[in-house]
Image (cartoon, helix red, strand yellow):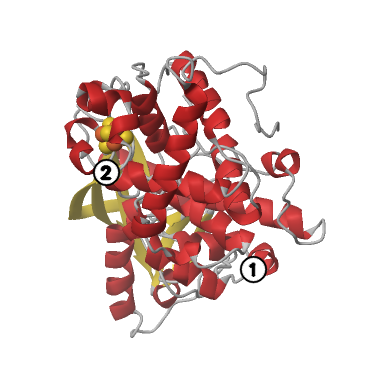
């Protein structure tokens, strides 16, 4: 990765050329914004350290997620995994358990993979942009934010917030979905980033975007320290700049889950290692397109196939909806029973990540928010049954290995946290 001490071509970036005196404009922005940031910047836990691991963790957690939501997760995660070595040594289930409820779980898995990669090379976070960018989950934004803040590397950090701020400063009207607009803003950001205090500069832009330069008509230009240096502020165009991005249509699906208990155990399944909610545990079920008549028969057929014994569906126990970034699940939990007793108990389903798990162990499994109401009901009721005598099962609890850990889109629709935060959000 190039370090943009000056613009790559040696010439001014397109958006800086719109200023009457670009060099003075840049200097005035530096002076004014940094002074404002030093007085009004947010006091955040990851700003009290220069530990690159902690700064990196904060940037990963802040992707697509608001600061207030991240703070308790940040503290809990660091208690459990205080450094790269501790994170690298953990089982993926433990990492997902610590991330449970924060959403966008792919970022947690990639962060874990990156820690393992680095521990194999000596256990240090690299200050070299080229090396850092090659780590799993690290894009231009994360590299710029982490390396500028932790090591003072003069790199820009352009996410959705910074794109909005820089577009307004320069009068760039295109939306963030437009690759040309994004490239132009990145070029401007690279030209603007100072060689002194680049981390403070990037954080000052983040704070301006979060506190004053808010999206749409919520921009607070009258309170803004750089209003006289901002095209949108001077012209009263903040509400129009930048143009709004595309909104992906929300896909609606029905998810039928089966609560099948036997001998104090519950049938659960781990999702595959890739894809939506990868690696999380859930009650088994079927996902169907919304808008079509759905009944529990298809759920019964699937469960029968999985356990190798006839089942009957008793009734619906729970209904709720769960919203992902671009997907809406209408979840129904159905009570299911085995039709006949099998002297050896039901067979452990072969493949597919299935397991019969004792009620007391359900709470230790990492469970995504979309499945938590159903799993919690299963755990509660099975715990009551656990008081009764247990029957032996074939293939008892062969798979779940998650140790008990305290605490709680990908673009295709991982569970959303609470709104936009930072992130590698190139179009
Ligand atoms: S003047 Fe308004 S649009 Fe410009 S940076 Fe400040 S808040 Fe944003």
- Residue 405 on image: x %, y %: 49, 74
Can the viewer see residue 4 in this picture? yes
Q: Is residue 124 above or below residue 418?
A: below
Nearest the viewer among 154 and 242 is: 154
Quadrant housing residue 206: top left
- Judging by the rendered image, the residue that carries numbered circle 1 is 83
Specify the label residue 212 is tagged with: 2
- Residue 358 on image: x %, y %: 44, 73
Residue sitting at x 40%, y 44%: 33
Frontmost of labels 2 and 1 is 2
Q: Residues within 10 Å of mark 2 (few under 14, many from 20)?
A: some
Q: Is residue 21 above or below residue 220?
A: above
Taking the image in four quarters, ligand 1 sits in the one at top left
Nearest the viewer among 353 and 224 is: 224
Could you tell me which secondary element the residue under label 1 belongs to? Answer: loop
Residue sitting at x 44%, y 48%: 34
Q: Earlier in the sequence, mark 2 or mark 1?
A: 1
Can the viewer see residue 346 in this picture? no
Q: Where's the N terminus, which quadrant?
A: top right
Please state if 8 lies on the left or on the right of 420 as rendered: right
User: Across the whole image, how many numbered discs are drawn on residues?
Assistant: 2
Mark 2–mark 1 distance (CA, rounded to whole Å): 34 Å
Q: Is mark 2 within 8 Å of ligand 1?
A: yes
Residue sitting at x 42%, y 17%: 20
Could you tell me which secondary element the residue under label 2 belongs to? Answer: loop
């Amino acid at each position: 990765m190039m370090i943009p001490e000056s613009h790559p071509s040696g010439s001014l970036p397109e958006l800086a050329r719109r200023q009457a005196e670009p060099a003075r404009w840049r200097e005035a922005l530096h002076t004014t914004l940094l002074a404002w940031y030093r007085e009004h910047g947010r006091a955040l836990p990851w700003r009290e350290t220069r530990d690159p691991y902690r700064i990196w963790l904060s940037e990963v957690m802040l992707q697509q997620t608001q600061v207030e939501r991240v703070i308790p997760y940040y503290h809990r995660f660091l208690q459990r995994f205080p450094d790269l070595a501790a994170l690298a040594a953990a089982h993926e289930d433990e990492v997902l358990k610590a991330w449970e409820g924060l959403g966008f779980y792919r970022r947690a898995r990639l962060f874990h993979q990156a820690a393992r990669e680095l521990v194999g090379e000596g256990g240090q976070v690299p200050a070299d942009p080229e090396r850092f960018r090659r780590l799993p989950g690290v894009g231009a934004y994360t590299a710029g934010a982490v390396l500028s803040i932790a090591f003072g590397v003069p790199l820009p950090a352009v996410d959705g917030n910074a794109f909005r701020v820089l577009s307004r400063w320069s009068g760039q009207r295109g939306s963030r979905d437009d690759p040309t607009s994004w490239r132009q803003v990145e070029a401007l950001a690279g030209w603007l980033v100072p060689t002194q205090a680049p981390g403070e500069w990037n954080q000052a832009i983040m704070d301006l975007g979060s506190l004053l330069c808010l999206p749409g008509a919520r921009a607070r230009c009258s309170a803004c320290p750089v209003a006289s240096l901002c095209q949108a502020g001077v012209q009263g165009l903040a509400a129009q700049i930048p143009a709004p991005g595309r909104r992906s249509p929300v896909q609606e699906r029905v998810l039928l889950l089966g609560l099948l208990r036997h001998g104090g155990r519950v049938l659960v399944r781990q999702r595959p290692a890739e894809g939506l909610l990868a690696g999380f545990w859930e009650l088994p079920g079927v996902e169907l397109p919304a808008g079509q008549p759905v009944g529990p028969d298809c759920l019964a057929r699937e469960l029968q196939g999985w356990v190798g014994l006839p089942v009957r569906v008793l009734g619906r126990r729970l209904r709720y909806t769960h919203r992902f970034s671009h997907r809406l699940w209408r979840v129904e939990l159905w009570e299911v029973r085995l039709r006949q007793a099998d002297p050896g108990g039901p067979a452990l389903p072969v493949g597919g990540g299935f397991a019969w798990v004792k009620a007391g162990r359900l709470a230790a499994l990492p469970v995504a928010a979309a499945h938590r109401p159903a799993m919690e009901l299963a755990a509660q009721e099975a715990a009551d049954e656990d008081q009764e005598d247990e029957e032996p099962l074939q293939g008892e609890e062969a798979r779940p290995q998650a140790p008990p850990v305290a605490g709680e889109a990908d673009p295709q629709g991982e569970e959303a946290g609470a709104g936009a935060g930072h992130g590698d959000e190139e179009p």
